[in-house]
Image (cartoon, helix red, strand yellow):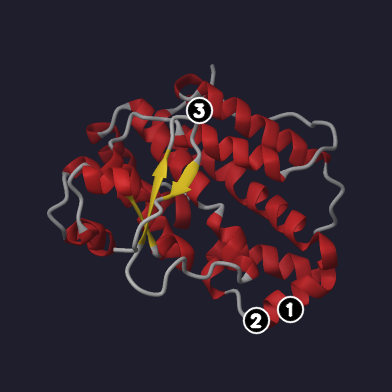
Amino acid sequence: MSNPIEQYAPEAAAALSAVYAARTALDIDLDDPRVENFADQFGVDVSVIDDDLRRRFLEATGPTAFEVTQAIYVDDYWPRIASVSGEVLGGGSWSGEVGEPTELWPLVEEFMRQVARLDSLDPVLTELVRLRGARQHECRLCRSRRSLAAIDAGADESTFEAVDDFAGSDLPAATKAALALTDTMIWTPYLVPRQVAEDALAHLAPEQVVEVVLDVARNAANKIAVALGADAAAVTDGVELFTTDVDGNLSVVEDEPR
């Protein structure tokens, strides 16, 4: 039985498999306690990585810090994707294959582009999933941006602010189900609450469940910047608008921040 990611998002699944294959080929030692502690906190709650933990990690990794953090991100989110999608939709396991040594970041970028091309979710819901993750990870850059497509589709700042208490908001049931699934991906990927799974199945099509799961994984690449302290806000006043083209590339709107 194929897994849900391969079934409903085959191009994204292929890109993710390439990421995993490249990751397994990397000769990276994560056993240094300074790296291990950093990786553990990266997975549990990246927002509380402090200057001391970051300093010790950088001392241990030196010029390879960015590459090591990429590997930690892949190790963190590959199993989350398989766990949550499988728990909600069922399907076979997804083990991946060992690849040849190659640069990891371009493959991560291709995965993110492929996920951005998925279109079963409307632009507003896609943006709310992104913002929910940005606020859970406390990514200053991501929090300072807004999707122009979501705004054009009718979202305003009150819509965006509703993600903070989505369960008690007047957002649509499908949106609440997607945001609850987002939280599960971030906080309890190996213990999916039954109600979250039931609500997802009741209000979202299977391909939408897969897109939420992959969107969260894509957006969680912001954990790399947060962990390394490289997530400064794009603007100091208002928000920066962005668009995503048909190939999944993000572009900043060259205009005054709103």
In screen coordinates, is 75 left or right of 22? left
Looking at the picture, how far across and down is residue 235, in whole percent?
42, 69
Real-space CA distance between mark 3 and mark 1, rounded to the nearest whole angstrom: 37 Å
Nearer to the camera, 175 or 224 = 224
Real-space CA distance between mark 3 and mark 2, rounded to the nearest whole angstrom: 37 Å
Image point (28%, 33%), residue name: 204
Image point (48%, 33%), residue name: 86
Q: Secondary structure at mark 2?
A: helix
Image point (34%, 64%), residue name: 239
For marks 3 and 1 on the same chain, the one whose residue lies earlier in the sequence: 3
* Residue 180 makes an appearance in the image: no
Residue lying at the far front of the rendered structure: 255
Q: Amino acid at mark 1?
A: Arg
Looking at the picture, how far across and down is residue 6, in whole percent?
53, 23
- Dot 1 crowding, Cα within 10 Å, few <14, some 14–19, many 20+: few
Residue lying at the far top of the rendered structure: 1
On residue 51, the disc is: 2
Residue under pointer 3:
5
Q: Are marks 3 and 1 in contact (CB under 8 Å)?
A: no
Nearer to the camera, 153 or 252 = 252
Q: Amino acid at mark 2?
A: Asp
In screen coordinates, is 199 left or right of 40? left
To which quarter of the image does residue 62 belong?
Answer: bottom right
To which quarter of the image does residue 17 belong?
Answer: top right
Of the residues tagged 3 and 1, which is closer to the observer? Answer: 1
Residue under pointer 1:
55
On residue 13, the disc is: none
- Image quarter where the N terminus lies is top right
Looking at the picture, how far across and down is residue 247, in whole percent?
49, 30
Q: Secondary structure at mark 3?
A: helix
